[in-house]
Amino acid sequence: MNKLHIKTLPDTRSYEKGLHEAGAEEYEKGVSEWALEHRYFIAGQWGRRFRGLFLDYGCGTGLVARNLVDAGREVVGIDISRAMCEIAKRKIGFEVVVGDCLNLPFRDQAFGVVCASGVLHHLPHQLERALSEIGRCAKQAICLVEPSATPPVFILRVILFFYKIYKWVLDRLYANLIGKYTYSIFERPLHHEKLSQICKKEGFQVSQVRFFNHIPLARTRTFFPENLRRHLVESMLSSANGTDVEIIAKRY
């Protein structure tokens, strides 16, 4: 008689909590690479496009929330890491809840919009559950930005190749640095079609899919004026492929 083999998917929450507790301050420095994209093209646009109360799902140190607040929106954040929440609260002063993103402590449709930036790719094995909770709490729309499984434009592939070498060298040099933020072993890029399918399953119609070709050395802000960097980001937006994908879905 053949034995039935049941594959148990890992629950990554404890690991992710420990990772982000230990490296919260270093993480805050790293996410600044995305500051310009969020200000002009992602969270800033979400805040200008939608009204109502926002939930920043997996808020981290508050990169999304600060741009929503700047757009005049009221925001609540939730994250599993207390250290991340404390930084977000200190920097922005908005309401932050330390909690489980797979069991949101909010009533159904408590928020006009639920947004998540760089969160779901930490939960590749609980993706449907995560989006089910997001959909349950969103009355109007879901806004997502996640690393994309589609390849970026060719020139960026070349840049990313050399950047990976650069990062590998740095990781070896600072391997024992206490408080250094390291990437999760569970992170996986996500395919936009799968995200769109789950959104539809939860009762949302996808209204926008857009790809960013993010240049990781965006800290060149020291050398290049903001307007130039803004035009560079805009010129590399794509409807077909990129390093990261934005999905906006509205409730039917």
Image: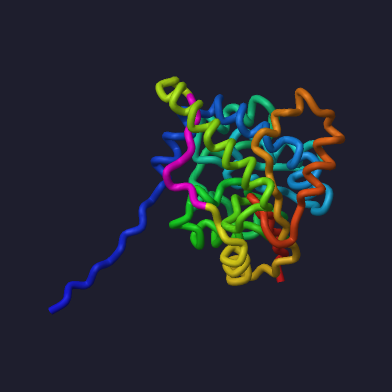
Q: Residue furthest right?
A: 227
In this view, 214 is above or below 247: above
Q: Could you say where residue 184 lies in the image, as x and y percent from the top left?
A: 46, 41
Give the quadrant of residue 217: top right
Scheme by which the image is coloured? rainbow
Q: How many marks?
A: 0
Q: Nearer the viewer, residue 48 or 148?
A: 148
Q: Is residue 218 visible?
A: yes
Q: Nearer the viewer, residue 45 or 147?
A: 147
Q: Residue furthest bottom?
A: 1
Q: Is residue 186 magenta?
A: yes
Q: Is residue 142 visible?
A: no
Q: Is residue 195 magenta?
A: no
In this view, 131 is above or below 235: below
Q: Quadrant of the N terminus?
A: bottom left
Image point (41%, 47%), residue name: 12
In this view, 182 is above or below 124: above
Q: Nearer the viewer, residue 100 or 59?
A: 59
Instruction: Judge from the rendering whether residue 126 lies leftward or rightward of residue 58; answer left or right.
Output: left
Q: Could you say where residue 47 lies in the image, as x and y percent from the top left?
A: 79, 47
Q: Which residues are magenta?
A: 180-188
In this view, 163 is above or below 139: above
Q: Could you say where residue 98 lies in the image, as x and y percent from the top left?
A: 52, 38
Q: Quadrant of the C terminus?
A: bottom right
Q: Could you say where residue 11 lies in the image, as x and y percent from the top left?
A: 38, 51
Image point (81%, 47%), residue name: 234
Q: Name the main secondary structure of what is drawn in magenta.
A: loop
Image point (67%, 31%), residue name: 32
Give the quadrant of residue 68: top right
Image point (44%, 20%), residue name: 177
